[in-house]
Image (cartoon, rainbow, N blue to C red):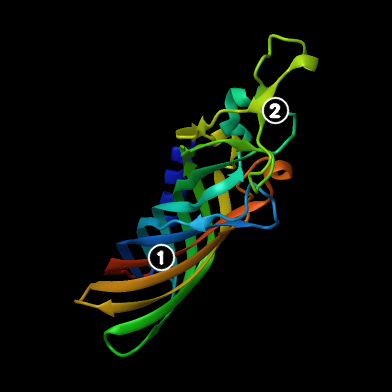
């Protein structure tokens, strides 16, 4: 069974609870995600990333258990990640053939722009409790686990820069100007500036499945017998490190805060 089949099966299994629900709601939500790549250490490769606003869109089912309590599950697509601009260490995946000119294990720096923003399929399963604020309004809180599945991860970079052995850019990487001569006669010159404009497939370097916790709150307003609009705020944090090689790249975790508006259609059910 491939990954897509597993996703569909999970959503269908959760959706079957609607037959036992007092009230079922089906709907859509959409908004913006403010992601964050959080480094748990001071690793030079993973710190100093800033947030990049992305989208957050999902369809959902909200299955009532009691008058105030329900289980809500989404099938969504969301952007998470961040960017880092300026002087920074160059990941091995971007060095290519240049790695043959450098000392093994030596960090090398350059001045370029890097974007690590990824698209995920997201499936949260949230316990939700709602209070009424009169006939038309209600507030709710929800929380629970979620699964993320990363789609085609690439790292986008741009810029042209010389290479350095230090973050201050004072020790340039040098190569022999006359490599045909014996090493004792080499004349060392700075490596020419390199173009870092590229989109690099980094799927082999990343954990493409994440598991985490999500908390949120919202305000809902009835706009008819069976319809409602809502404002929704969520925060999420992933427990699985983003990089597979945590020894080299540090322990990095993906999180985000999202703000969304949505529409839900209510269906009243009888208990079986």
Residue at x 73%, y 17% (from the top left corner) = 186
Residue at x 41%, y 58% (from the top left corner) = 53
- Disc 1 packing (10 Å; few <14; some 14–19; many ≥20): some
Q: Is residue 96 visible from the viewing direction of this image?
A: yes
Q: Is residue 98 above or below residue 140?
A: above
Q: Which residue is mark 2?
A: 102
Q: Is residue 234 above or below residue 40?
A: below
Residue 39 percent coordinates (x, y): 64, 56
Residue at x 55%, y 45% (from the top left corner) = 209
- Label whose residue precedes the other's in the sequence (1 or 2): 1
Q: Secondary structure at mark 2?
A: loop
Q: Is residue 16 left or right of residue 254?
A: left
Q: Is residue 47 left or right of residue 255?
A: right
Q: How many numbered discs? A: 2
Q: Is residue 192 left or right of residue 58?
A: right
Residue at x 61%, y 28% (from the top left corner) = 191
Q: Which one is nearer the viewer's eye here, 94 or 194?
A: 194
Q: Which one is nearer the viewer's eye here, 134 or 198?
A: 198
Residue 88 percent coordinates (x, y): 60, 46
Q: Secondary structure at mark 1?
A: helix
Residue 204 percent coordinates (x, y): 58, 33
Q: Which quadrant, please, contains the C terminus?
A: bottom left
Q: Which residue is mark 1?
A: 20
């Amino acid at each position: 069974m491939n990954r897509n089949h597993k996703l569909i099966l999970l959503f269908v299994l959760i959706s079957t609870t609607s037959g036992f629900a007092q009230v079922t709601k089906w709907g859509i939500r959409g908004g913006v995600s403010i992601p964050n790549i959080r480094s748990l250490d001071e690793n030079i490769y993973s710190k100093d990333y800033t947030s990049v606003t992305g989208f957050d869109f999902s369809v959902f089912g909200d299955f009532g258990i009691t008058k105030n309590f329900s289980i809500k599950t989404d099938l969504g697509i969301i952007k998470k990640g961040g960017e880092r601009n300026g002087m920074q260490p160059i990941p091995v995946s971007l060095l290519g053939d240049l790695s043959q000119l450098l000392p093994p294990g030596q960090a090398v720096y350059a001045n370029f722009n890097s974007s690590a923003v990824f698209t995920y399929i997201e499936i949260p399963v949230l316990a939700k409790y709602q209070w009424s604020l009169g006939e038309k309004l209600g507030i709710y809180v929800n929380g629970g686990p979620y699964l993320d599945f990363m789609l085609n991860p690439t790292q986008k970079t741009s810029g042209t820069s010389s290479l350095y052995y230090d973050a201050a850019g004072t020790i340039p990487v040098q190569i022999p100007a006359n490599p045909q001569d014996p090493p004792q006669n080499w004349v060392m010159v700075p490596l020419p500036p390199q173009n870092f404009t590229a989109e690099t497939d980094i799927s082999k370097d990343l954990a493409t499945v994440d598991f985490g916790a999500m908390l949120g709150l919202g305000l809902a307003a009835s706009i008819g017998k069976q319809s409602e609009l809502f404002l929704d705020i969520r925060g999420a944090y992933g427990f699985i490190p983003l990089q597979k090689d945590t020894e080299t790249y540090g322990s990095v975790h993906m999180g985000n805060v999202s703000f969304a508006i949505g529409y839900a259609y209510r269906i009243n059910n009888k208990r079986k």
